[in-house]
Amino acid sequence: MAIRAGIVGFRGYSGAELVAILARHPHAEPVLLEHRSDAGDRPAPLGFPQPERAPCEAATVGSHRLDAVFLATPADVSMQLAPEMLKAGAKVIDLSGAFRLRTAERYQRWYQEEHTQPQLLERAVYGLPEFYRDAIRDASLVANPGCYPTAANLAIRPLVRGQFVDLGAGVICDAKSGVSGAGRKPSLKTSFCEVTENFSAYSVLHHRHVPEVLLNSGLEESQFCFTAQLLPLDRGILETIYVRTRNLGSAQDLLEVYRQAYVDEPFVRLYPPGHAPDLRGVRGTNYCDVGVVFEPASQRAVVIAAIDNLGKGAAGQAVQNMNLMFGLPETAGLR
């Protein structure tokens, strides 16, 4: 029997990607949940079936037999809807930052807003399957990771946990994203004339995704320097991470750290030493590609991680989490 999955925010970039993935999923069926009455749709071709639609309200969980609800919504909307959908009996996968930071105080600091559902923070499971697969299987509320932290954590955590990083030298993460990471809501900074033929940094040192990296990679704020930059592209994230290592003799030793960490992971691909992934290789996929460069004499290492911000950075990872929550093959519907 197919998992009936409601999608709130299906008109946004991540929500539209969810619709596309679930429409081809062999064990799922998307249901579009109407949350905004004033929103318009793109034209649909004649003669092709469109997903079922239903009102975005708790009663819809029962009346339309929804097993799961994806919230591709701003954090304040997710905080409003998540408890209602959970109470109605649906499992919830939230793509916003509403439930990622574990405490209301931490959320207040980084998002500059009050958290209105602090009682759900302990219940939420951080949805990075490579680290928290078992907890995700048993979860009713999953906080889908941010796009930047997904790539950063997959690149940094194996080195920190293995004590291969000289933390006194710090960890520098230079991260670049396509414009869809900012969402579909119009703004001056993401308008065509501002973005095209341009390249800019933003939220330097104070990006709201920083605490996700700290919490899940085992770093202190003083040990981590993160800069987000906007690429004149529609989608994709590439992060270049600089560390000073300890106790590694060669690039092959560095690569072996990642081999051991991700040997059984279906969505982490490793490149040979000295070769770097790029955005074209991950576009439209749920993969995180990782490459390493290492200089033994100075113990300097550069780790390059690439993801599709709408795939592994959002909708793809959300579906990966749904698969785990319902006992489906983890790779179902994903590529």
Image (tube, rainbow, N blue to C red):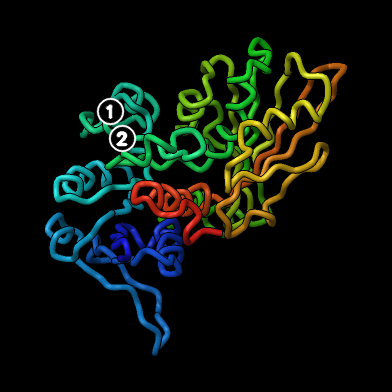
Tell me: residue 156, above or below residue 176: above
Residue 32: which quarter of the image? bottom left
- Asked if the residue at tag 2 contacts the one at tag 1, i.e. Cβ–Cβ closer than 8 Å, the answer is yes
Mark 2: which secondary structure? loop
* Residue that badge 1 annotates: 122
> Is residue 254 found left or right of 56 in the rendered image?
right
Residue positioned most to the right = 297
Residue positioned most to the top = 168
Label 1, label 2: how far apart the Cα atoms are: 6 Å
Q: Position of residue 4 (x, y in %)?
A: 29, 63
Q: Quadrant of the N terminus?
A: bottom left
Tell me: residue 69, above or below residue 76: below
Residue type indicated by callout 2: Ala
Q: Position of residue 272 (x, y in %)?
A: 79, 41
Quick one: 189 or 24, which is closer to the camera?
24
> Is residue 247 found left or right of 72 in the rendered image?
right
Tell me: residue 94, above or below residue 52: above
- Label 2 neighbour load within 10 Å: few <14, some 14-19, many 20+: many
Q: Quadrant of the C terminus?
A: bottom right
Residue 252: which quarter of the image? top right
The residue positioned 74% from the left and 32% from the top of the image is 255
Mark 1: which secondary structure? loop
Q: Position of residue 17 (x, y in %)?
A: 46, 61
Residue type indicated by callout 1: Glu
Visible residue check, residue 108 = yes
* Residue that badge 2 annotates: 124
Q: Position of residue 122 (x, y in %)?
A: 28, 28
The residue positioned 44% from the left and 34% from the top of the image is 132
Residue 49: which quarter of the image? bottom left
